[in-house]
Amino acid sequence: MSRFLDERLASLTPYVPGEQPRDMRYVKLNTNESPFPPSPRVAEALSKERINRLNLYPDPEALGLRCALAEHYGLRESRIIMGNGSDELLAFCFMAFCGQGRGVAYPAVSYGFYPVYARLCCLNALEIPLRDNFTVCPSDYFWLGRTIVIANPNAPTGIALPRVQLESIAAANPDNVVIVDEAYVDFGAESALPLIEKYENLVVIQTFSKSRNLAGMRLGFAAANEALIGDLNTIKSSFNPYNLSRLACLAGEAAVRDRLYFAECTGRIMRTREELSKALRALGFTVLPSSANFVFAAPPRMSGGEYYLALKARGVLVRYFDKSGLRDFVRITVGDDAQMRVLLDKTAEILEEPK
Ligand SMILES: *Cc1c(COP(=O)(O)O)cnc(C)c1O
């Protein structure tokens, strides 16, 4: 640390992304990326002519992409803002809606970025414990007098709340913003998008990184009523008006317009997830019911940390959280059939080893 760093940020612990080791080729099941390439229409959209126009700034409003999303979800494009990844929009929400003594609340077990943003913005943060079965209990979030952030499905548990329960949280906090982070919603959960008409305090955030196979392009969007979107646009335009590159806008639009490919990829992930859960349970694992593109699973007769290391030694990377209440578990991204076969073969090998 230099002697010039703002002392309020001296204790900032940055977000730790899943490891990306280069010492060997791993079966990489630790960052919830899609095992499938983006829609073939994405490569077609990124033509040489388009690349040759990178001398020009992109459209700061990303209108083409917002219109494609508006059409896809039956929303008005004035109710959508694009982000350079949904992380950027989450950060804008923390900047816009959580300050001035209002503070923010989120589940104590959830996306690792929430506490980081709270610290970065010097906010008062309340972490609300999960219930015993790893679920978010909606009534724990009623009348909090704080801005609320909930990942639905939650991470790393994969457990989703039904839409009516999110609605009850929005209804019970009429004077505070409720942010629903739907990074994994396309793998079988109910989206809160239809509720933004009815609740002026609701922001729904989605990403292209998981279900649209575009983690490398950095694309996300938020949907809310025009007033909230206006606030987020004010932050965006005060920070980075051209937050999406020209290529990202084109790639995103092509991906959204390929509904068939999207349905095919998400469908395959959901089928593989059910097969994986069943196979792990047959080996004696505890597997939480997942509505996401990963499973949170606890191996029999060993800790999550031991299992993680044994898999890593055999060339398979999963995510382990060294955190109270989570140490029995690992989070495994649902990959393609070949990756799942390797994972299950190595797992059987590990379980058979004498201890
Ligand atoms: C992956 C993820 C995101 C962020 O994704 P971006 O790549 O920044 O769009 C946001 N929230 C949760 C819960 C995630 O798992």
Image (tube, helix red, strand yellow):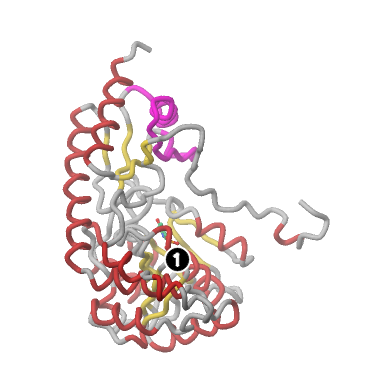
> Label 1: which residue?
85
Residue 102, placed above or below residue 113? below
Residue nearest the observer in this picture, 316 or 88: 316
* Magenta span: 301-327
Place of residue 49 in the rendered image (x, y in percent of width and height, measured from the top left): 40, 75
Please name the residue shown 28% across and 57% down the image: 160
Asked if the magenta segment contains residue 51, the reply would be: no
Which residue lies most toward the right here?
A: 3
Please name the residue shown 49% across and 38% down the image: 322
**Looking at the rendering, which quadrant does residue 348 occupy?**
top left
**Looking at the rendering, which quadrant does residue 26 occupy?**
top left
Please name the residue shown 50% across and 59% down the image: 114
Label 1 sits on a secondary structure element that is loop
User: Would the CB of label 1 be found within 8 Å of ligand 1?
Assistant: yes
**Looking at the rendering, which quadrant does residue 184 occupy?**
bottom left
Place of residue 88 in the rendered image (x, y in percent of width and height, measured from the top left): 50, 68
Residue nearest the observer in this picture, 172 or 317: 317
Residue kind at label 1, given as amino acid type: Gly
Query: Badge 1 local density, few (<14 within 10 Å), some, or many (20+)?
Result: many
Quadrant showing the C terminus: top left
Can the viewer see residue 167?
no
Residue 65, placed above or below residue 271? below
Q: Is residue 164 left or right of residue 57?
A: left
